[in-house]
Image (cartoon, rainbow, N blue to C red):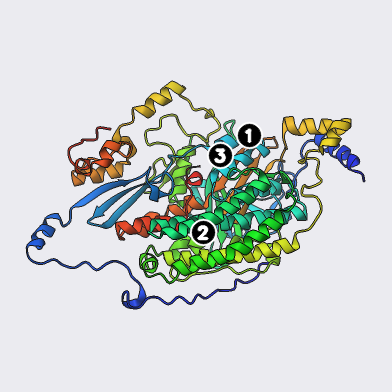
Amino acid sequence: MTQNDAFKKGLEGLDAGPRPSDAGDHGAPPQAGDLPPHPSVDALRERFGDAVLRHELVSGDEHIVYVLPDRSLEILQFLRDEPGHRYDFLQDLTAVDYGGGRMIQVVYQLWSIENKLNLRVKAELPLDGLEIQSVYYLWRAVDWLEREVYDMFGIVFDGHPDLRRILMPYNYAEGHPLRKDFPLRGRFSRAEQTRRALNLRTEDHYSPRELEIAHVLGQSVPDPFSPAETNSGQQQFGGMGGGG
Amino acid sequence: MSSKLRRVIYNVARNPELSSGGSLVHAPIVPMAGENARVQEDIAGEHMLINIGPQHPATHGVLRLVLELDGETVVRCIPHIGYLHSSFEKLGEYRDWNQVVPLTDRMDYLAPLIYNCAYAMSVEKLMGVEVTERCKVVRLICMELDRIFSHLLWLGTTAIDLGAFTVFLYTFQQRELIYDLHESFTGARITTSSTRIGGMMADLPAGWIDQLVKWIEGFLPVLDEVDTLLTNNGIWIGRTQGVGSISAADAVNWGLSGPNLRASGVSYDVRKDRPYYDMDSYDFDVPIGEHGDIYDRYLCRMEEMRQSVRLLRQFIQRLPGGSINVDDPRVILPPKTAAMNDMESMIHHFKLVMEGVRAPVGESWFSVESSKGELGMYVVSDGGSKPVRWRVRGPSFINIAALPHMIEGALLSDVIAVNASLDIVLGEIDR
């Protein structure tokens, strides 16, 4: 086949739209019996029954299991602790917002170092009930990941000991940036964004816990952006009183 | 599928005269007597809250740490990040699949090619595109080269943080030569943006492999010299052995990956455990430490550089000829002459440029072993020419989250050492 023919063949493909990947038709996920079995999914079905909603295979070899959000904690604990599964390494925790008022998915990407198994667990949350149990006490790795998902999507993780914004400033008032209803340039005008950035107080650079420590110690917190304060060690903890 | 890891045992003689048990932890606190005792009593138990960063040379970017100190001991450490936040993931949702590539190398500007490749690999997995054999090997060369590139920066800056200035000059001179390799391949030194879906931006230029071989020959003696400078250096050992150690179980639970995890004795390397691009057919070892402290992280990275060189030599030997780009009109533009001379190719060119590559409905997760740990790329598509969600599992973001766990109870001077040893890059932490 000459190169020209190859491109002509490709053009037909372009008109027909994207070719589906090996995963097959995503509109109607194949039934569990048709999929190559995944040992952990079978065990989950046996143990938790209806709490395991469905099982999908995407991109060739990636198993996804959808679970009821209310029971996600016990399911994940089972996956972490049960011999033969032992997903001891949490690769990632994130969320996906498809927009259009659809449910937001919380995605747990798990890996078992011992058994060399991959599994993606998803829980779907409606927009008016963005709340799920924290897995902080199962994997400490989610300490910052849950904070990030909270910051970016507004999902509240029940039981996380220190759930506060992580990438955006603590006084950020425009919402949760990775949600589809959030405009790329933010909700406030450029002038308002600048005004807010310039009007930050020293306390705005600290979390409530740090301010509490400083209060107990009888200190004022140092302003990280004021060279006058950082250079004069004497005054830093003296009577500057947070004048940023 | 994956071969069993071969454990590399280091002949590390812990320095017995430094302290009993062979690990030096802190300088002993000598109780004061006489008049000084009264002064010490005055300040005993009084804690202090201090702020390090965001603009501080030892925070390797714009990390900010708030420390509660009892004397010189860190009682509590609270990191703050986000000062470099550029919302890459949000920007990615407004760009074509190929236009996301420039965002990836701005995340980890210390090893840009690894991020370029990992992104392209995840999208190719989603689309079911199998790249050519030559492209696979070229990408593997790029990734191993940038592992060395990033480890060299880590070595130089960590040494300089701990007071060893000479090492910095050696490693940065070598980095300069890798910059030259980047430049002659991609045209850029840092922001390489070299991959495309289905291939590379360009094939290797003539003579590039010779340049690489020449660099490898010159690099190994330098690595040996650095080894001589540090490995048995009393100050280096004193500042690193037993400092910032984390147990294997904790390291796994905190999600550490890369050399930081392997220094604790856990043999998890994506190249061995989930081999991509036939990595299992190459011969290489994954070094594993046992104490999980800064010194073992250093040893792991030194050995990883040697293993990367070993891999690079095998890649060069096996580099096949043929096309660098896959022959798949869905993703690759027609050659210029065809686009100028025949109608179908011109239409094809126009559609690909104007609409962009389109990925089928679905999602894929692909992870590679970056210099800092497991780099995962998660892409979700709704069938359009832009990603619905592009998520980066950044190794630095998760590694640095364990910093408070490692330094609470240590000395203030160890904070700098531990922070340096984790090998973070703030572009990716703050994304």
C-alpha distance separating marks 2 and 3: 22 Å
Q: Position of residue B379 (x, y in %)?
A: 63, 44
First in residue order: circle 2 vs circle 3: 3
A204 versus B378 height, above or below: above
A211 versus B229 height, above or below: above
Q: Is B330 or B219 nearer to us in this picture?
A: B219
* Label 1 element class: loop
The three-letter code of the residue at mark 2 reads: Ser
Work out whether disc 2 and disc 3 sit on a shared chain.
yes
Q: Is B310 or B123 nearer to us in this picture?
A: B310
Q: Position of residue B38 (x, y in %)?
A: 8, 60
Residue found at x 20% / y 36%: A240
Query: Is the C-beta separation of discs 2 and 3 under 8 Å?
Result: no
The three-letter code of the residue at mark 3 reads: Glu
Q: Quadrant of the N terminus of chain B?
A: bottom right
Q: Is residue B329 visible?
A: yes
Q: Is A63 or B245 nearer to us in this picture?
A: B245
Label placed on residue A167: none
Chain of residue at mark 2: B
First in residue order: circle 2 vs circle 1: 1
Q: Which residue is mark 2?
A: B257
Q: Which residue is mark 1?
A: B95
Sort mark 1 into few (<14), some (14-19) or many (20+) by Cα contacts within 10 Å. Answer: some
Q: Position of residue B398 (x, y in %)?
A: 47, 52
* Label 2 element class: loop
Sort mark 3 into few (<14), some (14-19) or many (20+) by Cα contacts within 10 Å. Answer: some
Label placed on residue B89: 3
Residue found at x 75% / y 62%: B318
Q: Is B368 or A209 nearer to us in this picture?
A: B368
